[in-house]
Image (spheres, rainbow, N blue to C red):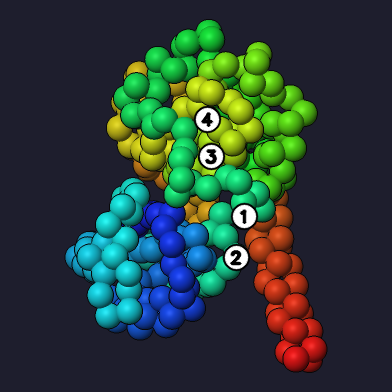
Amino acid sequence: MNKVAAFYQFRSLPDPGGLRAALLPLCERFGLRGTVLLAPEGINGTLAGAAQDIDSFVVLLRRGGQGIPACNGLEVKYSHAGEAHFDRLKIRVKREIITFGRPEADPARRTGAYVDARDWNAMLDDPDVTVIDTRNGFEVEMGSFAGAIDPGLTSFSQFPDFVQRHLDPAEHRKIAMFCTGGIRCEKASAYMLAAGFAAVFQLQGGILKYLEEVPAAASKWQGGCFVFDRRVALGHGLALAGPLQIEEESRLHANDAVNRRNDRLKLLDSARQNVAE
């Protein structure tokens, strides 16, 4: 059984390509598998490997050195997976570590107030709070908190449009949001604060931290939590969720197809740029 680290930090990375060159041999030396995304705004990744190797990698990433800037504010969540759940290593440089396309949403400047996983139930029970699930629609269908609003997103970049159409700072005075591990809420809450919403809260560590810390008997979570790797979905205690239904299998294959299409489009764009140059 491998140890899994899901991590992110919004911090300035002036040379994400150089960081990729430093991280790739380090991950290979530790025998790690998974995906790491790098951008000028920060780092986001999920890696699996032997427990001691994952721990060593996280220590080095936080400490920095040898071409790696110190990520001492790294948000990390741990779980476990079988060796077959992570079968390759990918380290990519992108424009954003979580695609949103709104420069005014700057988590390095300010975000919504963090709510600890063990205090989240009280937020859900507050009738004055509007609770929003910031994930994509197929993730919400697999599991969510009862009563949370599903914006019906097919991509996270649609979230600002949902806010503009359906929410009003004068009417929705307290907003609480959640996502898988917390990173989407960093941008979503930053956007809402920039849009004039005064009281914005977010579940610290996301659904995964809630499932890890809140006992099933006290939990308000229903269903499985989709994760973007071959484990597919996790439940309470971060154990693997039950067998997939046919509809969930179809959504997973569709998500894989979208990722493959996007990879092909990026290759085509790169080829066009090389020709133009």
Sequence-first tag of 3 and 2: 2
- Residue at numbered disc 1: 99
Under mark 1, the amino acid is Thr
Sequence-first tag of 3 and 1: 1
- Residue closest to the eye, 199 or 3: 199
Instruction: Count every numbered label the image shows and give the total.
Output: 4
In the picture, which quadrant includes the N terminus?
bottom left
Name which residue lies at 52% across and 30% down.
Answer: 177
Q: Secondary structure at mark 3?
A: helix
Name which residue lies at 62% across and 55% down.
Answer: 99
- Residue closest to the eye, 23 or 67: 67
Q: Nearer the viewer, mark 3 or mark 1?
A: 3
Vertical order, 154 against 120 (above or below): below
Q: Which mark is residue 95?
A: 2
Could you tell me if the residues under marks 2 and 1 are in contact, i.e. CB atoms within 8 Å?
yes
Vertical order, 135 against 176 (above or below): below
How would you rate the neighbour count of disc 1 (Cα within 10 Å): few for under 14, some for 14-19, many for 20 or more? few
Could you tell me if the residues under marks 4 and 2 are in contact, i.e. CB atoms within 8 Å?
no
How would you rate the neighbour count of disc 3 (Cα within 10 Å): few for under 14, some for 14-19, many for 20 or more? many
- Residue at numbered disc 4: 177
Q: Nearer the viewer, mark 4 or mark 3?
A: 3
- Residue at numbered disc 3: 190
Residue 274 position, x and y percent, is 73, 89
In the picture, measured across the screen, residue 230 lies left or right of residue 246, that is left
